[in-house]
Image (tube, rainbow, N blue to C red):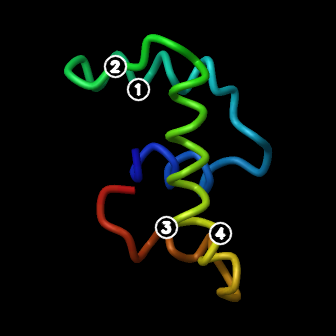
Amino acid sequence: MLRTVLNNVLQEDTLPDLNELRKLWNERHPDETFSRRREFEKAYKAAFKAIIKPLEKLPDVHGLRNKLPSV
């Protein structure tokens, strides 16, 4: 989930289409699929709150793209 959130946040400036992200997640993670949009949204928001929100205090969050492996 971390990589999904980071990829989206670093590439987009708008709220993602969670239905599309859930579909992509389910295709890429067949052993950890989300059958309901609400479940995916909850996991996405938890990851965002725990990982991305604290990074907003950094001067250039988008600069992290070059510092994080496989993002």
Q: Earlier in the sequence, mark 4 or mark 1?
A: 1
Please rate how many residues cluster around mark 3, counting C-alpha atoms within 10 Å: few if below 14, some from 14 to 19, many from 20. Answer: some
Please rate how many residues cluster around mark 4, counting C-alpha atoms within 10 Å: few if below 14, some from 14 to 19, many from 20. Answer: few
**Residue bearing mark 4:** 53
Can you tell which of label 3 and label 1 is closer to the viewer? 1
- In contact (CB < 8 Å): disc 2 and disc 1: yes
Query: Residue at image x 64%, y 27%?
Result: 18
> Which secondary structure, mark 4?
helix
Q: Position of residue 56 (x, y in %)?
A: 69, 76
Q: Is residue 69 left or right of residue 65?
A: left
- In contact (CB < 8 Å): disc 2 and disc 3: no
**Residue bearing mark 3:** 65
**Residue bearing mark 2:** 33
Can you tell which of label 2 and label 1 is closer to the viewer? 2
Q: CA distance from mark 3 to mark 4?
A: 16 Å
Q: CA distance from mark 2 to mark 3?
A: 26 Å
Amino acid type of the residue tagged 1 in the rendering: Trp
Q: Earlier in the sequence, mark 2 or mark 4?
A: 2
Amino acid type of the residue tagged 2 in the rendering: Thr
